[in-house]
Image (spheres, helix red, strand yellow):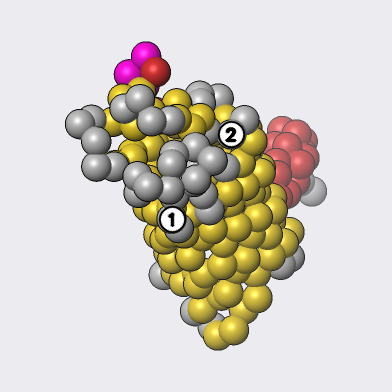
């Protein structure tokens, strides 16, 4: 016959033992893997310079599940000059260097990002100096990016995207007294490139 003093102890143990087993099972629940991504894209820019610009954009990203944060560096040069802003007799060249931060949400092959660009706009011409209104050449934009990706190999993905931006600063370029051009209030960037996912472990 069992000792009556042990009955409460046996009941307490029977109630307590399943709890650690459940907790142990919860700790083994799958968690989204964290991985890195490296990419390089060719881009076309509209509205950032007097004419359409072309450039490159290398990037590094950290992805956790369907969320990703990326840092990019963009170097874009204008394809010619803008005769409506600067006389055709005075050739000018413009370029922009940008740092880009984006927060993205992925779902299957498509993604949507919130994007912020910050950089410097430059122009050169055969005049004494490039003058700007209030001495500011800094360019700051904010916008959205939408795109899609296609896996073409185990560690290689082709991605294309389109960005729409609103200019938060609009630098005014003046090449001496001959003319000027101001950054558009809205801009667009289109790109296509390759992404190299790096799986953990």
Residue 32: percent from the left, percent from the top?
A: 60, 57
Q: Which residue is drawn at the image coordinates 49% and 46% (left, top)?
A: 82
Q: Is residue 147 visible?
A: yes
Q: Which-is-in-front pick, marks 2 and 1?
A: 1
Looking at the picture, tell me which residue is in the foreground, 27 or 162.
162
Q: In the rendered structure, does residue 174 fall within the stretch colored magenta? A: no
Looking at the picture, tell me which residue is in the foreground, 75 or 178.
178
Left or right of 65 on screen, residue 155: left
Tell which residue pokes out farthest to the left in this image: 128
Q: Which residues are magenta?
A: 134-138
Question: For mark 1, does the 10 Å Cα neighbourhood hold few (<14), some (14 to 19), or many (20 or more) residues?
Answer: some
Looking at the picture, tell me which residue is in the foreground, 83 or 33.
83
Residue 80, label in figure:
1
Residue 41: percent from the left, percent from the top?
A: 48, 65
Residue 83: percent from the left, percent from the top?
A: 50, 45
Q: Which residue is drawn at the image coordinates 29% and 42% (left, top)?
A: 124
Tag 2 residue? 184
Q: Quadrant of residue 79?
A: bottom left
Q: Quadrant of residue 33?
A: bottom right
Element type at mark 2: loop
Tell which residue pokes out farthest to the front in this image: 89
Instruction: Say above or below: 132 vs 11.
Output: above
Q: Which residue is drawn at the image coordinates 48% and 65% (left, top)?
A: 42
The quadrant of the picture occupied by the C terminus is bottom left
Confirm or deny contact between disc 2 and disc 1 (CB under 8 A): no
Q: Which residue is drawn at the image coordinates 45% and 26% (left, top)?
A: 172
- Give the mark, 2 or 1, whose residue is nearer the N terminus: 1
Instruction: Say above or below: 64 vs 135.
Output: below
């Amino acid at each position: 016959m069992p000792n009556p003093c042990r009955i409460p102890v046996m009941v307490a143990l029977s109630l307590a033992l399943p709890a650690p087993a459940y907790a142990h099972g919860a700790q083994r629940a799958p968690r989204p893997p964290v991985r890195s991504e490296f990419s390089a894209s060719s881009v076309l820019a509209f509205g950032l310079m007097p004419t359409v610009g072309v450039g490159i954009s290398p990037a590094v990203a950290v992805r956790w599940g369907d969320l990703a944060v990326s840092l990019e560096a963009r170097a874009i040069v204008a394809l010619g000059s803008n005769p409506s802003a600067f006389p055709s007799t005075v050739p000018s060249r413009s370029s922009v260097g940008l740092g880009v931060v984006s927060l993205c949400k992925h779902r299957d092959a498509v993604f949507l990002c919130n994007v912020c660009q910050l950089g410097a706009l430059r122009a050169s011409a055969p005049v004494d100096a490039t003058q700007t209104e209030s001495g500011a050449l800094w360019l700051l934009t904010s916008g959205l990016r939408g795109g899609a990706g296609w896996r073409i190999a185990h560690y290689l993905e082709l991605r294309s995207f389109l960005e729409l931006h609103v200019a938060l600063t609009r630098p005014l370029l003046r090449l001496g007294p001959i003319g000027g051009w101001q950054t558009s209030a809205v801009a667009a960037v289109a790109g296509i490139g390759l992404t190299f996912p790096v799986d953990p472990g």
